[in-house]
Amino acid sequence: MIPTLRFRLAKACGIAATCLLAVQPMEASCNSSEHVASLNKLVEAHTEATAETESIEVSDTLYLEELRVIGTRIEVPDHYQPVWIQSVDPTHMSNLPHESAAYLLSGNTFSLVRDYGEGNMALISQRGFPPGHSRILWEEMPINHPMLGVFDLSLIPAGMIDGLSSSSGNPAAMSGSGGIGGTVSLQTRKRDEKAFISHSIGSYGFGQTGAGASITEGHFSGGVRAYLQRGDYDFLYDDPDPVRQQKKTRDNNHKSAGFLLAQSKYKYHDWRFRSLVWLDNITNELPGSVYAPSRARQDDRSYRWLLQTGYDGFERTWITATAGWYRYELDYTDQRTARTDAGTSRLFMIQPVARHVWSHRHESNFAAQWAWQKIETDHYAQTSHHHQVSTRVNHSWQLASFAVLYPSVEWETHTEFQNALNPALGITFLPGTQRLILRGMVSRNRNNPSFNDLYWQPGGNADLQPETVTSYETGFSFRFSANGDEEVVTAGFTLFRNSFEDGIRWIPGPDGRFTPRNMEQIRSRGAELDLRMQREISAIGFDLHYMVSHTRASITKERFQGDGAVGRQMIYVPEWMHKGSFYVAFQERIWTRITLQHIGQRFTTMDHSSPRDPLSAVTRMDTDAGISMAVRSTHIQASIGIRNLTDQSYEIISGYPVAPRHYNASLTVSLR
């Protein structure tokens, strides 16, 4: 049996170590006004390159919290990166602490969430590539499961994270190998509240209780937060058989989960230290497909630890060293056979990073990483482990007042595969205005086979080679501010094309046994448009957001004689997606939000031969409303939401119906 049937694809919380990433400093200490000015010039070069640097009075610490480095590893705001970055508004995350990271990404980014039903797994697909080709990062550390290559974002409640962003097509030289489809980044920060407690309830027995506290004392700050979650998620759905046309009960995923996150931070003169610990324990009673029910129990336990230390005492250089460790345990029990399959993954990694600002025209980021990864499972002939060494150089070069070049390269050596060189070149132009940025990127990326692809017994293929892709994209970013400091309209448009080689596919052999092979050549191309208008009139704030994406992804070369999949749209890749949201807030106290998603038809087979093909297009609407109030130092926040407002009956994945109209409510009390 192939591994995707033995292990539930996305109940995975292990940290994979097949890419190289730098964890940027949370703060950069500045010893002089000259030092601060050199950093300011780096950002001002895009917006006021021809203006003279003014003498300003600054504090002795420069906070870089608002800067993202997911795009190029160079610290410039998202608007000036050569790739389009979508960030979920932290306000939405705060308003909906009970929702998952998958739900937030689905409504706020181009990512397609392959939803297996309420309370079930949710995998991210980007630009026509399957979920194993999206890189999921926590604090710049990859957390894709090494055995399967995917990560289930339904496992992460919004209350556990403080930042969430997505960048489709991000190259290996900037975010590490493996993110062929794109990169999703999760950030954790210290909360403002001294303590909080929250409780959420919803349809189908859903409940979540959370509590946390934080402290700041001199140079030290820290905090802890924990959540308990449960739900049986049973609901009625329409029988897919067109003859019967009746309602049936979906005896769905019964889930209980516990999450704990602790963090601490200390700064002493020019030294800084940061530690994060993330634990979770999740139990699922899995239903399987409605066409072939296969009830099973899965237990997931993961332990993650991250330690950073950095030195900021040099004039133009910042040094950060990161050590990371994790242990992830997965037990899968088939209730029909009572057999338990167990797997344990371990990782240890060390990563030094140096950032240097040469001048207001040049900045570099240098990084190296050594990682050791080990897998123990009943389905490998022996314990398997890999070593990997990576180095990366990212550079920003301001060619002129209107153009910036971003050359980057990653070199990777691996115990199982040949050395790889993954270059990338990005560029941005300012054609006479600060409002419009023209951008482009060309890059090479690769994706190493998963441990299951290599070692699964029976069927694994130790002779597999990494998948590779050459990516091209171009587009523009636009922003308009009515009063010079208040953004009213932002827009991003991207054309992309990917040429994918040596794709791995599990296919049956003459004996009927499935085996993975390097056999697919895929071309993915399309366009993405993101429009957003934000405006405040008197005490009322408006936020209107619209996204549309068009993707054509297909096999370009026959895998065998008479291959009917050539030229046809890839499975579960809609050609068109439209997403929109409308948010209104009164004095930031009373708010309401409506979201709308239209997902085009999808196919369940490569050659579109299934009688269930295609799955119908679906339009889904969700709505939320809430209120916030403060009584002295106590802050109270309440919300209520309706999911699938129009009571649509549909499936994103064949055999896994999505729940009909359902409800949730949340209450949070915090002390500030």
Image (tube, grey):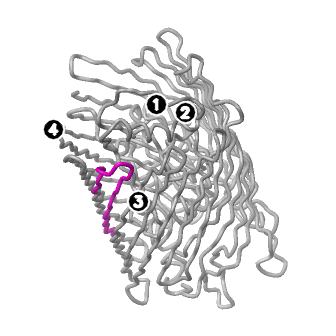
Q: CA distance from mark 3 to mark 1?
A: 33 Å
Q: Sort mark 2 into few (<14), some (14-19) or many (20+) by Cα contacts within 10 Å.
A: many
Q: CA distance from mark 2 to mark 3?
A: 32 Å
Considering depth in this image, is 58 or 619 the residue closer to the camera?
A: 58
Q: Sort mark 1 into few (<14), some (14-19) or many (20+) by Cα contacts within 10 Å.
A: many
Quarter of the figure with residue 66: top left
Q: Position of residue 424 (x, y in %)?
A: 62, 61
Q: Nearer the viewer, mark 3 or mark 4?
A: 4
Mark identifier at residue 218: 4
Q: Which residue is mark 2?
A: 622
The reply, left or right, for residue 68 in relation to residue 575 is: left
Kind of residue sitting beneath label 4: Gly
Comes first in the chain, label 2 or label 3: 3
In this view, the residue farthest toward the left is 217
Q: Main secondary structure of the magenta part?
A: strand
Determine contact: label 3, label 1, CB under 8 Å: no
